[in-house]
Image: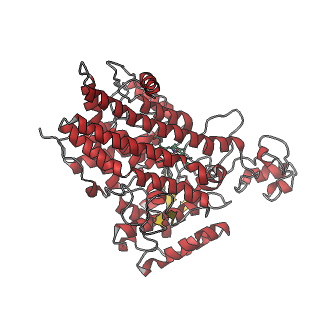
Amino acid sequence: MAPKDLPILENYDISPVTGFLPAEEPLRVLPDPYFAPWEAAFQDFNGLLLASRLRQRVVELPILDASRLKTKAEQRRAYLILCMLSHSYVWGKHELAAESLPAPLAVPWQTVADMLEIQPVLTHAAVVMWNWRLLYKDGPRDLSNLDTLATLSGSSDESWFYLVTTAIEATGAPVLSKILAAIQLVREDNALAVVRELEAIRGIIEELVGVLRRMFEKCDPYVFYWKVRPYLAGWENMAEAGLPNGVRYEGVDNGEYKKLAGGSAAQSSLIHALDIAFGIEHYPTGFRPKKTPAAGSSTTTASSPSTTTTSSSTTQTATAEAVAESVKKAHNSYNDDSSSDMAKKAASTGGSTSNNFIQKMRFYMPGPHRNFLTHLQEVTNIRQYVMDRAKETPRSVEVEQLVAVFDECVHQIKVFRDVHIQIVTLYIVMQANRGPSISHGGFVLQPKEKETAAEHGNKTAAGASDATTSPSSGSKGSSILYPQKVLYGQPLGLAKKQEAGNDVVRGTGGTDLIPFLRQSRDETNESKIIPAPLFAKRKASSS
Ligand code: HEM
């Protein structure tokens, strides 16, 4: 049977030059004056939020007909506006979270999300891929020439946070054509040419690591954790933040609650494409399939996630639908299960599960990009080829080179994940452990804390204005000099101080963050053809 055709990037809304980023700069304003009320609210929304008047402004908005958005560029601009206004509305500024989103936002948001085949919740696509402009029109898409169109907090730290990620997408763009070229060369059994493509890919991944490291330069971890991250949160696993059921979208699906995860670069199709190209598989946290290191290679005893097993004879559309369904199932199932339950389930079914957080993140990508990943999964062959050639005895120089460069690529993805873990440790774990520098963490007091304060006869504690004499959940009194010692009960949103002795910090999807990220890194490392310890030894001796 003839192998399935390789995907053509342009058919999936992907540019060979800019990758998953649109080839043209995102629109700075919607051209149709009909949408002027949205643009006006968007222009003012940072100020309205600060003045606690955004919610009032939102309910005054008309319910506009989003089907009038004709081009993809217009739909993306509208989606960005509606994502930022809606997350600002739900989380507020020093306000209790709102569990109902008014129709002027909810109705068009759902319509635009359907048009883009994405979810009506803030995503990586909104804030990273469709939220940039070039400072100099003819300049590069890198950190010397990029600015954001909007931020939720109005801070340059938030801009940098998005722009580093935008620059990663731009830097990684050429990798997509090279992956496809390598797959074609494998089909032609042209090992030497595959080596050349992989060398180029290795160089690009190294560049990605370089850009990622620049996060530390201009994004302050405190600002990120306490002022930005709370707004990126979605409404899944947010009971503690006051949204146990998610958010009701008024005028949509009979006003049913939706539980949707918030924005995360785990939704970056670029990183998913690299994982697929190099055969890196991820499993639920706590569940690791057994490895059988044989002849310098490693194979998993667990069956692959469902996306890897789709028959290549099915039509592209049917396959895309099947996989969309499987991603949806992974999403729902992930919502229902804790990661340890999933691990048990995975173990009891011989490891056959696709309920991994990373897999679930495809649900939050734009439809064409998700479909591209599905197609790529169906044709990926590089890893299998390198493994097969590695079994040859004796190995030719060419095969030695092939194995070495394949492992170098995987190693760079592993280094990317190492740096990412350092970032998450500084930007999330350490901030959560230190606590906020104002005692209420910048969040509104919840009624029960006010009552508790009143019961204690401490009048000033009920207001957030005086941090010097307030009671806290943990310690007695505080000093304005050492405010980080004291928190008023549970602050809202994702930003919260860790309780002493509790070292579990959770991600937006409810994952136990560090074990999840470490496992993802280790799964990468273990995907080398030459087992990782041997690879390290060889690398040390060659340098
Ligand atoms: C301040 C910077 C960053 C922070 C604090 C951060 C935080 C996180 C967190 C908490 C997760 C766990 C999943 C979740 O709950 O969303 C995650 C996953 C992930 N992040 Fe980031 N991230 C940052 C920057 C980036 C950048 C620039 C990229 C580049 C594309 C990236 C790519 C990923 C990927 C691919 C995952 C999925 C896990 C994996 O594949 O190993 N992150 N990140």
Across and down, in percent, residue 390 comes to 28, 25
Across and down, in percent, residue 317 comes to 23, 51
Is 354 drawn above or below residue 389 in the view shown?
Answer: below
- Residue 256 visible somewhere in the drawing: no
Seen at 52% across and 56% down, the residue is: 162
Seen at 45% across and 46% down, the residue is: 208
Seen at 45% across and 24% down, the residue is: 541
Is 522 drawn above or below residue 76 in the view shown?
Answer: above
Residue furthest front in the image: 543
Q: How is the image coloured?
A: secondary structure
Q: How many marks?
A: 0
Seen in the image, is 275 located left or right of residue 84?
Answer: left
Q: Nearer the viewer, residue 176 or 443?
A: 176
Seen in the image, is 228 located left or right of residue 388?
Answer: right
Across and down, in percent, residue 187 comes to 19, 38
Q: Quadrant of residue 279?
A: top left
Residue furthest left in the image: 1
Is 24 drawn above or below residue 17 in the view shown?
Answer: below
Across and down, in percent, residue 314 comes to 19, 44
Question: Where is the N terminus found, in terms of image quarters?
Answer: top left
Q: Nearer the viewer, residue 408 or 353?
A: 408
- Residue 50 visible somewhere in the drawing: yes
Seen in the image, is 462 located left or right of residue 150?
Answer: right
Q: Nearer the viewer, residue 518 or 297?
A: 297
